[in-house]
Amino acid sequence: MLQPKKTKHRKWQKGRSRKRTTETRGTKLDFGSMGLQAVSAAYVSSKQIEAARKAINNYTKRGGKVWIRIFPDKPITQRPPELTMGGGKGSVDHYVFPVKPGRMLFEIDGIPNETAGEALRKAGFKLPVKTRIVTK
């Protein structure tokens, strides 16, 4: 699954909500002719990205080309169960990508539009965000 090879900081602070609630970068189709765009906001984990990628590849019989437009580089820490308070921050458990509405998640090209649309629809079910299918 996707995770960074090397990071500047092993653990990140959580961060607070910002004023901007929609995405400004990565909102248009750049590579493929059809894409899956986020409509809501959530953290998308590397396991969820991998499950969506597998759903696309399985439905298209590995035809065409698929671009994954997001990469999980935000570490999420977790403490072991039944541990008392005061032991510090937990170790890194998994990596996520914080998705805002408007972000293009996947793009696909080289297969018929009906097949691509159904593949992207199946991939959308694997993700924790509401999605829509966008065409050029």
Image (cartoon, rainbow, N blue to C red):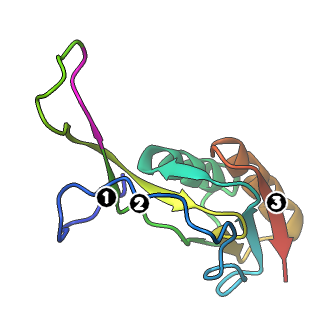
Magenta residue span: 77-81
Question: In front: 110, or 48?
Answer: 48
**Residue 32 appears at what percent x and percent y?**
69, 81
**Residue 54 appears at what percent x and percent y?**
55, 49
Residue 87, relative to residue 83: is it above or below? Answer: below
Mark 2 surroundings within 10 Å by alpha-carbon count, few (fewer than 14), some (14 through 19), many (20 or more): many
Instruction: Kindly identify the residue that appears in the image at 66 percent across and 87 percent down.
Output: 30
Q: Is residue 118 left or right of residue 11?
A: right
Kind of element beneath mark 2: loop
Question: In front: 34, or 42?
Answer: 42
Residue highlighted by disc 3? 132
Instruction: Kindly identify the residue that appears in the image at 65 percent across and 54 percent down.
Output: 41
Q: Are marks 3 and 1 in contact (CB under 8 Å)?
A: no
Instruction: Kindly identify the residue that appears in the image at 11 percent across and 29 percent down.
Output: 87
**Which callout, 1 or 2, points at the residue further toward the start of the chain?**
1
Label 1, label 2: how far apart the Cα atoms are? 6 Å
- Which image quadrant: the C terminus? bottom right
Mark 1 surroundings within 10 Å by alpha-carbon count, few (fewer than 14), some (14 through 19), many (20 or more): some
Residue 3 disc label: 1
Label 3, label 1: how far apart the Cα atoms are? 26 Å
Q: Magenta part mainly helix, strand or loop?
A: loop
**Which callout, 3 or 2, points at the residue further toward the start of the chain?**
2
Residue highlighted by disc 2? 72
Label 3, label 2: how far apart the Cα atoms are? 21 Å
Q: Amino acid at mark 1?
A: Gln
> Which picture quadrant has residue 133?
bottom right
Q: Are marks 1 and 2 in contact (CB under 8 Å)?
A: yes
Q: Outermost residue, bottom direction?
A: 30
Question: In front: 21, or 5?
Answer: 21
**Residue 53 appears at what percent x and percent y?**
56, 55
Q: Amino acid at mark 3?
A: Arg
